[in-house]
Amino acid sequence: MSKLLDRFRYFKQKGDTFADGHGQVMHTNRDWEDSYRQRWQFDKIVRSTHGVNCTGSCSWKIYVKNGLVTWETQQTDYPRTRPDLPNHEPRGASYSWYLYSANRLKYPLVRKRLIELWREALSRHSDPVLAWESIMNDPQKCQSYKQVRGHGGFIRSNWKELNQLIAAANVWTIKTYGPDRVAGFSPIPAMSMVSYAAGTRYLSLLGGTCLSFYDWYCDLPPASPMTWGEQTDVPESADWYNSAYIIAWGSNVPQTRTPDAHFFTEVRYKGTKTIAITPDYSEVAKLCDQWLAPKQGTDSALAMAMGHVILKEFHLDNPSDYFLNYCRRYTDMPMLVLLDERADGSYVPGRMMRASDLVDGLGEANNPEWKTVALNSTGELVAPNGSIGFRWGEKGKWNLEPVAAGVETELSLSLLGQHDDVAGVAFPYFGGNENPHFRSVRQEPVLVRQLPVKRLALADGSERMVVSVYDLVLANYGLDRGLDDGHSANNYNDVKAYTPAWGEQITGVPRRHIETIAREFAETAHKTHGRSMIILGAGVNHWYHMDMNYRGMINMLVFCGCVGQTGGGWAHYVGQEKLRPQTGWLPLAFALDWNRPPRQMNSTSFFYNHASQWRYEKLTAQELLSPLADPAKFSGHLIDFNVRAERMGWLPSAPQLNLNPLSVKASADKAGLSAADYTVQALKSGAIRFACEQPDSGHNHPRNLFVWRSNLLGSSGKGHEYMLKYLLGTDSGIQGEALGSSEGIKPEEVEWQSAAIEGKLDLLVTLDFRMSSTCLFSDIVLPTATWYEKDDMNTSDMHPFIHPLSAAVDPAWESKSDWEIYKGIASVFSKVCVGHLGQETDVVLHPLQHDSPAELAQPFDILDWRKGECELIPGKTAPNIVVVERDYPATYERFTSLGPLLDKLGNGGKGIAWNTQDEVDFLGKLNYTKHDGPAKGRPRIDTALDASEVILALAPETNGQVAVKAWQALGEMTGREHTHLAINKEDEKIRFRDIQAQPRKIISSPTWSGLESEHVSYNAGYTNVHELIPWRTLSGRQQLYQDHAWMRAFGESLVAYRPPIDTRSVSEMREIPPNGFPEKALNFLTPHQKWGIHSTYSENLLMLTLSRGGPIVWISEADARELGIEDNDWIEAFNANGALTARAVVSQRVPPGMTMMYHAQERIMNIPGSEVTGMRGGIHNSVTRVCPKPTHMIGGYAQLAYGFNYYGTVGSNRDEFIMIRKMKNINWLDDEGRDQVQEAKK
């Protein structure tokens, strides 16, 4: 051992040593250790998690000392399944800071101007409802508090006073305008499912409108319902470890999937190759073997170029038996498609052939118009089992057994070799559309390709040519079949759609990389039977043509037989969307135990309409149409398509009618008709109109809005400035001109009013634990309990466990749990409504639902009853019209008890139903029953813990007995035995105390498409492939060809590259005065951030310290040089929608032409005034506006049918461009600064 240090004075040893000089005996004072011990002492540890939509859903230890939470650490006691466990989530480790920080909401708050009006009104009116009415009937009073929303001015109130105000507002609104004018928004129930259910249960008992979130967030990939009839189902992250080849496409795994990223790195030690595909150099690129950087928004072009290689090499040149057999059995590729003749003699693909098209219907008497047809290997026409016509009206044939008409059969993929002729079939091409910001490859807008066809005699006496979907797919990808096709590619270097050379021109990715990765991906899948995977990030889904991006990638997986195979398939991860005990939660959340159906609305259409974003629409449907479509049939504004969809029952409406739905019964009685029949008659005569046709009439907009578990105005609110102006009636930064002052296309179906209503919401109530952006603009802010202060439950798609949120401590200050808050409002409502509302008859319009017989409503042509093209038939050509009896004085009793409809009608989900009487009886014994009142004898749901037990008892995922019943019910439909998947768990019943003791793994359920097994990780589509359960689509198989008339008209029956749209947000804004610095238009992207989970944690002191302490925008070094911007300079981004201010992060990781602002950076921290608007700078959504897509409005058509958060218009935002420039004057809007900004604005 060296004695060198002993020679120095300050390193000399001062005591005895031991361990051969490595240890030393010290006699110094050690009292300092007590402070350390005291800091880390605790009284108890409680299990909880974070209900923040982080998707991690990790189990945490919450340390409590003296009744306060002191810190948290990760739990690691997961049940043994594999050695792989969820790992670490750093942002969650800062959550305990929130509980006692200055950000915490401590008391109920109310806008001062409103509460003064309320107190004055109450002094003159003893009835609270009349008091509220007196305020609402005075426009000046209404404007006085609406115009100062967002300006501060909150004062402390109390629960009693505010519950009374809220209840009175609800009662008056329901009585005067209807229950559908009361709405609520809350997202992602899986992160705290009881808290979500509290608000929606209250709203549903009133008949109020529950707004969707998954489509509004743009987390919903429409390609999933299109292809599989499933909202989203994906592998758990552990299944990454089973993969042999992974492409991370737009998914920044280590940043946004932190707890699961270890699987991504660990699988590489097994030899798995990983590829990153992102336009910027993101963190995931560091974990991968290769990084491809396509031009943002061109993902479908890259996917199709890879698909071209896969089809050529593994389907045509060197066919893989595994790939061909998979496609034959599990996809719609063998199905036949009718060809429609064009004026020039060529043909276009029409709808899929059905059994009803043939003379004898192939012997299919039940739903023959919904049974698809194929040729078998012997050349016979057959209707193979599994199509959607077998799902409803008969039993035992809805399966994927290789059977048709009871005879085993093998389907033919291609008609080549047994064709009668070769025909020229036209395909639309959009890759030549010019856009100054994106590359194009000019070709003819219509590409005529040569396909093998057969001629068939039909039942109507005509002869038609048919082609197989497989042959259409090959032709669509530009592959040469030896049929003298001039538009097909000769080789990969031929710059024709969709070759690698063409892909290089569009995306910028070298063709050799496209070829190599496509080949490796397919070769791996061939050798491993499908263990190639694509992990998808939400960013790819945030483009207007997101379905084309996703369908391109899905096609790659389907061509290679990856979907439904362990270690393979698609892995679309966005929010914490997977509410695993869904069927147990649904009755609680939407009060299905008392009333059916609930009112549910897709938020994208809701906010597009009621925030008047449609009044600024510059995009037309004609721009979106296929060159093969007739533009005359698709005239009007985008909102016209939404109105037509609502009228035909494709989409829901909110509000629904232009009158109070509670008033219909009285009118019907006078006419001697039932309420439903009267509504039909009045709609046909025009005496009743759809509210969406008159949005600015003054009666047809929402008036009360609840927001909870959400930061609607600070995170997800696309078109933020429009919401401020039209919904809230306060200051906004809109810089564009409405249609009234421009030459844009005005609606045909919507009555145009030159002046739109501003300040539509009479009351905005927000529940939160912190002062968020949404709270700032609210009228009432109610303090909620945090995730360590309430009982709730949490699940994720990333792992199979169910976690509790536990009340480690009591709610701090005067905060309450969401369940207690809504229970309190329901109690006051039940008293306040007496004399105004009693037992009322409500008329509810219910759209044609997916997973119900209504999805078979409209098999062929699109017929609009308003135009006289058909009769108005509820449930067929229009929404279902359902009469619901409501008992408003019994709202509280119903809220706190389990209703009788579960006894009478049972429970179920996704088209499967089972008896649930045993579970209801069990809950009566567990939670006890009501002793008296309207709910006498019903099981109690007094507390959030009671509500949790209701979910756990009713769900097959947490009650083995229910799981067996559910599998039995599915077996009756498929004719196959499935109970073996759950029979060994029949006696397992998970209770809330069980999951507090240790996380529990859920039980396999037929409402999901994967298995919870000790042998395989959860993988979507597994039961479809291995249990032969059909996908819930038209063909019962993976649906690559979308044959609905609107899909064909808009050129999207097959996947195609569609460049980003031009929203004209930069080209058509008003003139902005220059500030002396150069400006440039850049594409505006909003990925998920590193220093927060959505907006939560973004103003957390710990996270702000680790980042730059406020909003930032990333730009490239090249663009920064051009604009004279240096790192950390203040910049301003603006367009027709609004403006924002932030600091610039100049980085080489960002390519020129694009800019990134990590989403949901709160506008409450460190934001100066805008030189453009004269107000404080906005948030990321200040420069966005919703632009709906007509093909997402389709309904009543197999998998293309509405379901809450399943299908509908989607709130995309990545096609937006902003002007960016350096700021000249940085003013913080104190009095002097505000004057300077206003002067600069002038």
Image: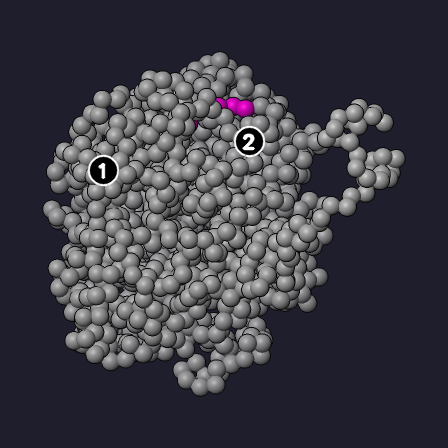
Q: Position of residue 924 (x, y in %)?
A: 55, 78
Colour option used: one colour
Above/below status of 834 relative to 37: below
In the image, what residue occupies the spot 38% across and 59% down? Answer: 767
Q: Is 1175 included in the stretch rendered in magenta?
A: no
Q: Residues within 10 Å of mark 2 (few under 14, many from 20)?
A: many
| Of 625 and 93, the residue lying toward us | 93
In the image, what residue occupies the spot 30% across and 40% down? Answer: 1178
How many numbered circles does the render carry? Answer: 2
Q: Nearer the viewer, mark 2 or mark 1?
A: 1
Instruction: Give the residue type at disc 2.
Output: Val
Q: Position of residue 295 (x, y in %)?
A: 42, 24
| Of 510 and 170, the residue lying toward us | 170
Whether residue 1004 is visible:
no
| Of 1193 and 1001, the residue lying toward us | 1001
Q: Position of residue 1211 (x, y in %)?
A: 35, 43
Q: Which residue is mark 1?
A: 1233
What quarter of the picture does the N terminus occupy? top right
Question: SS for tag 1?
Answer: helix
Range of magenta residues: 291-296
In the image, what residue occupies the spot 47% across and 24% down? Answer: 1149
- Judged by its main secondary structure, the magenta piece is loop
| Of 507 and 396, the residue lying toward us | 507
Q: Which residue is mark 2?
A: 284
What is the C-alpha distance between the residues marked 2 and 1?
Answer: 43 Å
Q: Quadrant of residue 1142?
A: top left
